[in-house]
Image (tube, rainbow, N blue to C red):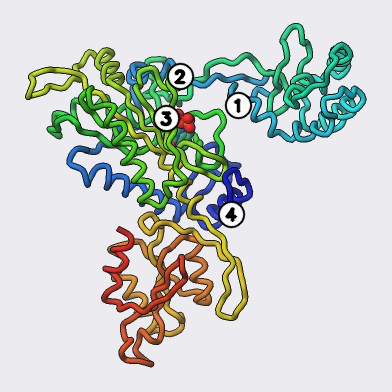
Amino acid sequence: MDRPNDPQRMERIVSLCKRRGFIFQGSEIYGGLNGVWDYGPLGVELKRNLKDYWWRVMVRERDDVVGMDGAILTHRAVLKASGHEDTFSDPMSTCRQCKRLVRADQVEEAVLETPYAKSLESVFNNGKFNGAAILRWAEREGRKLAPNMAIVRNPQVTLSWLAEHFEEASAPLVEFEDFIRYLATEQLNVTGLVMPCPNCGGDLTEARPFNLMFSTQMGASADTESIAYLRPETAQSIFVQFKNVLDTARKKLPFGIAQIGKAFRNEINPRNYIFRSREFEQMELEYFCRPEHGMELLDYWLEERLKFYENIGLPRTKLHVLTVPDADRAFYSKGTYDIEYEFPFGLQELEGVAYRTDYDLTQHQAASGKSLDYFDEDTKARFIPHVIEPSAGVDRTVLALICEAYDEETVTDEKGKSENRIVLRFHPRVAPVKAGIFPLLKNQPPLVEKAREVQALLRPLMNVFYDETGAIGRRYRRQDEAGTPFGITIDFETLGERDPGLRDTVTLRHRDSMEQERVKISELAARLSGAIA
Ligand code: ATP
């Protein structure tokens, strides 16, 4: 059974995604653009099905939610008022030698994963100082793996204070991390112990805030007035358009405004495949309410969102709810939950459900000078509504769906030969292709003609894939790997050649059980539509 933190499983998933056309590295033929991904033919269908289902349950099936689609380019004043321009940052250090930027809170973790740290394990010697071995390492492996580390750049100086220091110290070093710090420190009394650059072993600067927003210039002049941002979240355009939507949609509290769209963050350390990228999509709802209903609606939306994930095939047992502790919550939030999923690389956030009080509307009202309040016709009072925000990542959910669906099993084929079957067990609702349509033999025009008829029948209702090449078993396997829940085979029975009673029936094969049944063509549309709804 696969466990969380299973790098091999993740590697197999990534390789399948590339091989079958789910996800490609952005700008791949030019060496790739870090943290940017393109979705291929199967990936785009999966992503679209996810977004469509979210839109359906969050907007179309509700009386109290309307949608909008805001622009990506955002006025600087919006992100100044929201607090992003001043505070949307991670503390960063720069390497003085290779100039690489590193997130200060992740240096240690990154260093321990480097090839130089792995290679230093053999020199650690359980913390007992061995100057000769260290020098040897610096001259050989160190030069290749960590050319800018103090012990490599300046072995004599570094070793001499190290030797002195360890002669005085009575106990051996306990932690391997400290050992690395010692080797990376050239002047202990000036800098204290330092952690090296994960890329080259060099010196890191003090941590400084680094803004995660992408800015761009609008228009012909390139001065500060012309700066605009690519939005770092979709939420702000909802707050900015709150009054326009309220006036035109004529909604009463509580009501929500939903949006799906791209967001951009200059993440320092994009990683875990599409989990943390620089361009991604969000599905966000801002649900406005009276202040007294905030806390109960926060719990209501948490439950709604958990149901959503279950309905797309992520079992409740793999979803964890983290109640964000007071100290980690935004200062304006009265309560925040993170919904986390057990990815093969660990438990990680899929969605945040936050009670943001009246912070955003109050900020924009103050900064714009335009009233963003709500008039209560019953009490004749005016006030700024509070808001609950379930904010989900499209790409992270796509990744969770793929990780959850991925399965390998050993099966026995018709000839009794056992083989490895890779299958994506997507919920039919999100599966990129709903049914594969296969004429048994491509050189039999009546079979091909009938298969094309079935294709034309189902096409307006769902995404189907026609495939006539190769043995039928191979065609099934190809669709298993694509996660297609149904296979429809048009065979000689369909033509009524052997048993006229079977005329106009097909073999319907089920991906997960591999069971096959006979179904009338006239019943196919209703059967499959029911399963994928
Ligand atoms: P994290 O702590 O993982 O950086 P966050 O708490 O900053 O995420 P939010 O600002 O709450 O994230 O954004 C809401 C959702 O948007 C997240 O739950 C996630 O699904 C998605 N998201 C945020 N940043 C990224 C990213 N860099 N790549 C992909 N999805 C993202």
Label 1 Cα crowd, 10 Å radius (few <14 / some 14-19 / many 20+): few
Q: Say above or below: 339 vs 90.
A: below
Q: Amino acid at mark 3?
A: Thr
> Disc 1 or 3, which lies upstream in sequence?
1
What residue type is disc 4 on?
Met
Task: From the image, state whether disc 2 or disc 1 is nearer to you.
Answer: 2
Q: CA distance from mark 1 to mark 3?
A: 23 Å
Image depth: mark 4 or mark 1 in front: 4
Front-lying residue, 335 or 191: 335
C-alpha gap between disc 4 and disc 1? 30 Å
Give me the C-alpha separation between circle 4 and circle 2.
37 Å
Residue shown at 30%/36% (left/top)?
301
Looking at the figure, which quarter contains the C terminus? Answer: bottom left
Mark 3: which secondary structure?
strand
Query: Residue 353 sits in which quadrant?
Result: top left
Asked if labels 2 and 3 touch by Cβ distance under 8 angstroms, the answer is: no
Could you tell whether 318 is left or right of 108 in the image?
left
The amino acid on which the numbered mark 2 sits, given as a three-letter code, is: Ala
- Mark 4–mark 3 Cα distance, whole angstroms, equals 29 Å
The residue identified by callout 3 is: 323
Give the CA distance from mark 3 to mark 2: 11 Å
- Disc 2 from disc 1: Cα separation: 20 Å
Q: Mark 4 or mark 1: name the one nearer the start of the chain.
A: 4
Residue at 36% x, 16% y: name it.
80
Question: What residue did someone put label 1 on?
Answer: 106
The amino acid beneath tag 1 is: Gln
Instruction: Determine whether 24 is above or below 438 in the image.
Output: above
Residue occupying the point 52% across, 44% down: 343
Q: Which mark is residue 64?
A: none
Q: Is residue 76 visible?
A: no
Q: Residue furthest top?
A: 189
Up/down of 95 relative to 518, above or below = above
